[in-house]
Image (tube, rainbow, N blue to C red):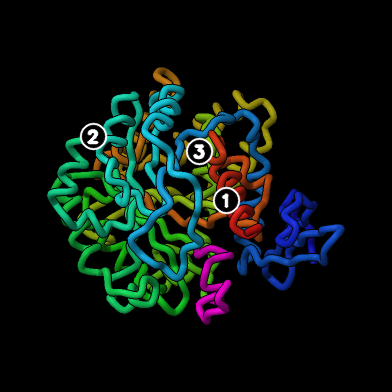
Amino acid sequence: MALLRRTTAICSKCFNKIPADIIESDDSIFMVKRCKEHTEQDVLISKEAYYYKELSDFYFSLNLKNTEKAGLYYNFHMNSRCNLKCTNCPGTELKEPSIDFIEKKLKNLKDKKIGIWGSEMTERNDLPKIIGLIRRSGNIPVLYTNGIKLADMKYLRLLKRSGLTAVYLRFEGFDGSIYRRLYGENLLSAKLTALKNLEKLNISTSIRTVVKKGINDNELAKILEYCIKKPHIKCLMFQTSYFNCIDQKNNDETSNRRMTIEEIIRILEDQTNKRISNEKVLYAQKAIYSLFDIVRLKKAFCNRDIPIIRKKSLDDSSIFYELIDFKGMDDILKRYAKIKNRKRAKAYLIFSLCLRAFNVKLIPLSYLFLKIAIFRIFTRKRTLLSDIGSSVFLLSFIDPCTIDNFDFDATKGCPLGEISQDYGTQDSLAISSLLKEMRRKKK
């Protein structure tokens, strides 16, 4: 047993802040939480100790204090009603804010991505008006949805006319039985129709897939291939399922289907003939952490992001780490993290990357990075997924924060905040999600 670092966590029983150790044991990573009133609590964090340890050591060696304190983006919780009864959704009971409240909050924000979200936002009849308010306030409206109502082209056209340019849509795979198990009904046709409508209207789309062992884990490569072939889809996010979801409360057999990020990547390794693997993601992710550090933008530790230079199919496309030997540059990145003078460190890293990493295929990605940097330095605006064009596609792996796995040190880099009538403005979505989960459990 080896101690990796000490942090602050939340007791799963009394919800108090407590000390916790991140330890390595039997090639796995655990969070060991110590509460004075309750027994010691062990939470599995990763089953791939080497990859987690390498990333953790590097991430926490960076000077995160220089990143922005406020959230880069905000999700605005506007609804607690839903048109589905999912078995893997914890639900929420927050107040539904009025138009006046929404308008008042938007006055304090400018040039931000505002996520319109809740249980299912299309259940609000005034959604077009909300989209228009966000657009007129000088911010960018982004709709989070299960996509069912977007199968109605007339309705989607109305949302676009109101100012909608980007959508985050939940999609679990191409087998109707998946939806029957998760939602209680076959929603595949409605989901595919919604995606076709978004493509026809050229609305920037991001796909979020919650991966569950034995349910949709055999669909990952199919989903990735589909997204690569659709230029309007900018990002695919494979997400681990929540620790504390409804099926766990009901002692359903799906409670043991939660997978870690490394397990999801391991499955993709088999499905993509090893083009995507934990080792390749590891070294590339260090470079991505470093690039975010250079432009002083927040980057969450619990996420992994892999840019792909998109072509007609995955076989024709070039994955970020296939263009640069990041493993061979690992010593450069580690030295960068250790240089105390950050200006000197950034100059060293940029010079080293220019010497070692030039590849003509990287031109679209280099352009994107320069665009982010220039916007950041001169206009204070952020480049959004809807702005990056069709040549660059982002593959992400996400592990949500819950009471069980909450790590205060790891959440400091969360770039996403949340606004709600119940909790006001929280600059960290991780903190906001924690408050909501504690509220549910106390009831």
Segment colored magenta: 240-256
Of circles 3 and 1, which is in front? 3
User: Three-letter amino acid code at disc 2?
Assistant: Gly
**Residue at 36% in and 71% down:** 183
- Asked if residue 245 is among those painted magenta in the image, a careful observer would answer yes
Density class for disc 3 (Cα within 10 Å; few <14, some 14-19, many ≥20) is some
Which of these two is toward me, 311 or 237?
237
Question: Considering the numbered disc 1 on the image, is that residue within a helix, a strand or a loop?
Answer: helix
- The percent coordinates of residue 395 (x first, y second) are 39, 54
Determine which residue is flagged by label 2: 163
**For this view, does 229 lie left or right of residue 372?**
left
Question: At 55% from the left edge and 76% from the top edge, which residue is drawn?
Answer: 250
In the rendered image, which residue does mark 3 sit on? 421
The residue shown at (62%, 69%) is: 47
The residue at which mark 1 appears reads as: 436
Measured Cα–Cα span from mark 2 to mark 3: 24 Å
Q: Earlier in the sequence, mark 3 or mark 1?
A: 3
